[in-house]
Image (cartoon, rainbow, N blue to C red):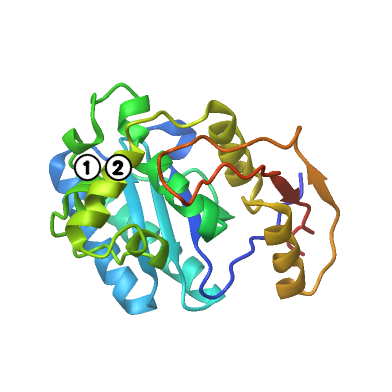
Amino acid sequence: MPRRTRVHLSGMPLHIVQRGHNWDACFFAEDDYLVYEQWLGEALRSTGCQLHAYVLMTNHVHLLLTPPNPEAVARMVISLGRRYVQYINRTYRRTGTLWDGRYKSSLIEADSYLLLCQRYIELNPVRAGMVHDPVQYRWSSYRGNGLGQLDSLLTPHSVYVGLGVTDEARQSAYRDLFRSELDSDLITELRMALNQGQPFGESRFIASIERAIGKRREVRPRGRPRKPVEDGASFLSGRATVHRYLSLAPFP
């Protein structure tokens, strides 16, 4: 099956996942997480990408970041991935691949869906049954976003900053978002967009991407228009939304 084109745009949030080969583990000990975080920080600084949320699971990694230019994303993910594979192979006296092919990515509409995506990422350990509360999981951005714990990897997005006028107000409002469960249909659509390399957002967001890449593509609605889950925050204000996907040409 031909590969889909990845769409990376300057200044637009991007949800990235990199999985272990055949869903096998890619972190085996505490030192592995620490090494990955250290090199992730170096990769962010060298490319200028801004990280808003992340989670390091046993067999995959989620990142939500905004790149300064389209080329920065692949440069960061590929160089970090290769460096980490070399470390794992050397440390555990193994050979071969660690990651499952190409990383997956999906553009995220910031105004309505960035905080939803952050919650999806930081709730991964809870959905996996590893912890009961995201604060209990060490290897994610939740403690930084929700509690204000120092995390040098993070750069808050303007949507997050808009949650309050002070750090304490923002953190409190952010924690409040986690009081309700994520809508299961939205989770399904977010995952589908990620797996298919499709943007995640409303129809006008898709149209803006078409204009940005200079290509007009068929936009297909998925299901009936639905209202997002009320989270007690204004960024999901009960407006009816239609999640649509953009069909893109494969790599040559």
Asked if residue 41 lies left or right of residue 8, the reply is left
The quarter in which the C terminus is drawn is bottom right
Which residue is the extreme one toward the top? 129
Q: Residue at x 52, y 59 (%)?
A: 111
In this rendering, the answer to whether 195 lies above or below 77 is above
Q: How many marks?
A: 2
Q: Nearer the viewer, residue 102 or 184?
A: 184
Give the percent coordinates (x, y) of residue 119. Answer: 39, 42
Q: Amino acid at mark 2?
A: Arg
Which residue matches tag 1? Answer: 92
- Image position of 203 with respect to 119: above or below: below
Badge 1 vs badge 2, beta-carbon distance below 8 Å: yes
Image quarter in which the N terminus is found: top right
Q: Which of these two is toward me, 138 or 104? A: 138
| Amino acid under disc 1 | Tyr
* Res 94 label: 2
> Is residue 139 rendered to the left or right of residue 200?
left
| Few, some or many residues within 10 Å of mark 1 (<14, 14–19, 20+) | few
Q: Give x and y (percent) for residue 72.
A: 47, 74
Q: Give the percent coordinates (x, y) of residue 161.
A: 33, 64
- Residue 164 bears which disc, if any? none
Say which element carries label 1: loop
As drawn, is 48 to the left or to the right of 11? left
